[in-house]
Amino acid sequence: MTMHLAHPSLSMGGKKKGKIKFRNAEEARKQRELESDWHDLQKRWGVEAEDKKRKRALAADPLVYSLGTPIGRSNTHHIKSLDTGHSGPVSSKQPTKYTGGEMLGIGQLHKSNAVPVFRQQDAEDIARMRRG
């Protein structure tokens, strides 16, 4: 598949925002003013977005990559298997078969919706729902 046929979400560009374009210089001036007011408010309250990101990144545990054996796999050789008393291979379970002895019939709840009926009360309820 060539890249011109791929969906834009498959690109490797990430989620960076592009340059913000404004209708005119007045709109750009208002945006810069609002942004500076917002930064002043953050500084006044002691909340710095960049400092918060930096602190969170420094507090996180470093990622550790290893290509060796996963933890817990190599040190379990001393654990023995459970002895169930069977000496040979296990036979497969007999498949269960439904004979239909409990089912009274098939009701039609709505349009082509077939519903199995197991009790007389179920059949009466289905009949009442169809007539409203």
Image (cartoon, rainbow, N blue to C red):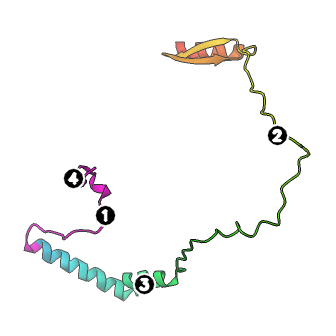
The residue pinned by badge 3 equals 54
Residue 6 in the image: above or below residue 90: below
Identified by mark 4, the residue type is His
Q: Position of residue 10 (x, y in %)?
A: 32, 56
Q: Earlier in the sequence, mark 2 or mark 1?
A: 1
From the image, give the main secondary structure of the stretch colored magenta: loop
From mark 2 to mark 4, how far is it between C-alphas? 56 Å
> On the image, which quarter does residue 73 sit in?
bottom right
Q: Is residue 75 magenta?
A: no
Q: Are marks 2 and 1 in contact (CB under 8 Å)?
A: no
The residue pinned by badge 2 equals 89
Q: Are marks 3 and 4 in contact (CB under 8 Å)?
A: no
From mark 2 to mark 1, how far is it between C-alphas? 52 Å
Q: Which residue ends up furthest to the right in the rendered image?
A: 85
Q: Are marks 2 and 4 in contact (CB under 8 Å)?
A: no
Secondary structure under badge 3?
helix
Q: Earlier in the sequence, mark 1 or mark 3?
A: 1
Which mark's residue is nearer the viewer, 2 or 4?
2
Q: Residue at x 32, y 83 (%)?
A: 41
Q: Earlier in the sequence, mark 3 or mark 4?
A: 4
Q: Earlier in the sequence, mark 1 or mark 4?
A: 4
The residue pinned by badge 4 equals 4
